[in-house]
Amino acid sequence: MNATQEKLKVQLEQALVAAFGTDFAGVDPILVSASNPKFGDYQANVALSLSKKLGKQPRAIAGAIVEKLDVSEICEPPEIAGPGFINLKLKTAYLEAQLNAIQADPRLGVPAAKTPKREIVDFSSPNIAKEMHVGHLRSTIIGDSIARILEFQGHDVLRLNHVGDWGTQFGMLIAYLREVYPDALTTANALDIGDLVSFYRKAKQRFDTDAGFQETARQEVVRLQAGAEDTLHAWKLLCEQSRQEFQVIYELLDVQIIERGESFYNPLLPKVVEDLDKSGLLVENQGAKCVFLEGFTNREGEPLPLIVQKSDGGYNYATTDLASLRYRIQQDQAKRIIYVTDAGQGNHFAQFFQVARKAGWIPDDVELVHVPFGLVLGEDGKKIKTRFGDSVRLRDLLDEAVSRAQADLKTRLQEEERQETEEFINEVARVVGISAVKYADLSQNRTSSYIFSYDKMLDFKGNTAPYMLYAYARIQGISRKGDINFKELGNNAVLLEHETELALAKYLLQLDEVISSVEQDLLPNRLCEYLYELSKKFNQFYDRNQGVQVLEAEEPQRTSRLILCDLTARTLKLGLSLLGIEVLERM
């Protein structure tokens, strides 16, 4: 709910009390945005809900409310429509005053959170010795956008990369490393394995076909857990090799994240099991230590246990997640912990959240949130794969997007007979390509799967990053053509005379409501929808004025329209930055 809605809601609540008494204090006036502009801007539907309680017709109730309603500073006289809807239309003068008020505000009228909190966003989370693939795309992009929005709102955000850097698979990898790079374990030099995926596959092949190698790998796990110096050295080499590969992706995507892998919590695991035992939750089942869960059953319909220590003394992912959760609450002092993973892990989070609550580890003021997302599908509607059936490498996918953006740009330049430097072409291609991939993902409701299509995401028409980037660049073109410095427009007044100006103004003033909703429900696609609609509203305004009429208009309309252009560009730039998308001054 934006600031204007808040004001109207308060006035409606007061009118309810004035009309029907204090028993109606706190009754929701059911204020919503009007579905059709001809009905105004907002609609209060409370009269219909009170008909039975008051024993009156809704129109009569609406009339009594309107009689006591004072919104003269904000709206035209309220109108009662249909069975009892109260329609409210914002005054042009009010809209002008609101826009004039945000001109000098770098936050464009978006208030920061009243009570900033320590929030953790757990996202990306690749595995050591495996390259990041398209499956990591959504977690990385969605998590980064959520973190950006929370940071903008003033929250203290800790961005964590819960990397898979511990476990039995490292015994296999270290054993294979000893065979193929024996010198690496005794020197301080950095290791260059080359193709990590190929290395992992060869190690796995040895493990699956050679019983002797399997035993060697198991011994390496024991040595790793015991802290043997040479084994630890090998483990660090593997981690560093992967880390370098991950960083290339994060730099391409402009993602900042702090690595805190599974190994970080490894020393804390025995205490987790010990404390669960003390709380009376731990049950031994077939040699394993576990907690039985409510609401979860196995195929036979029996209660499902969550194993926290296996019969051989080893630990599970759930044990590590419980340890990390406790650390984040006790040491990081987090008040909201957000986990961004695929929807398939929903049961895992529900289960270990339940164990933590049963153990009394979650204070009342701490919120745990699993942010699930669907799959990235190929154009055949199936999980996106290479032609060999492998997961698509994320680096390859991003490089292909940039390459296609570059080809499209060169074709456009030829058609327009424009000459641009190679540096310009490369920079525009990079921004458009990476932005197209990000926006295509973020513009979907994250709970749904979506079809990955280069052609659609790079299209300059429709709900795409290029469409938004072009709207921004179009405004900068007005600035260049008229030799206008938007910052020097000062505090000149906005004057709204045409319906396209009014529509654009109303949309500009909805930014605070949109960002507030994303802060709460963690759905970045709502911000994408807003920016798309804003771009359309601007283009309608621009096309009506045929561009040049903005510059050639008489004063004071000229300056007013320039301010509208500037506010639109600033809103687009801010909104896109919260999605992790750069803008371009020229395209």
Image (cartoon, rainbow, N blue to C red):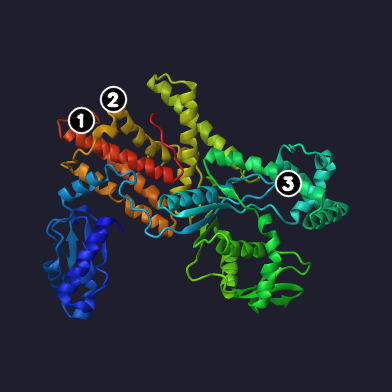
For the residues bearing labels 2 and 1, Cβ distance under 8 angstroms: no
Is residue 388 shown above or below 523?
Answer: above
Q: Quadrant of residue 586?
A: top left
Give the class, few, some or many, for how many residues have Cα within 10 Å of label 2's Cα (few <14, many ≥20).
Answer: few
Look at the image and tell me whether residue 544 can be seen.
no
Can you see residue 505? yes
Q: CA distance from mark 3 to mark 1?
A: 63 Å
Q: Nearer the viewer, residue 125 or 532?
A: 125
Instruction: Give the mark nearer the N terminus: 3 vs 1.
Output: 3
Q: Residue at x 36, y 45 (%)?
A: 531
Q: Residue furthest right?
A: 212
- Residue at mark 2: 481
Report the quarter where the C terminus lies: top left
Can you tell which mark lies on residue 236? Answer: 3
Element under disc 3: helix
Residue neighbourhood size for the residue with mark 1, other residues' Cα within 10 Å, grouped as few (<14), some (14–19), many (≥20): some
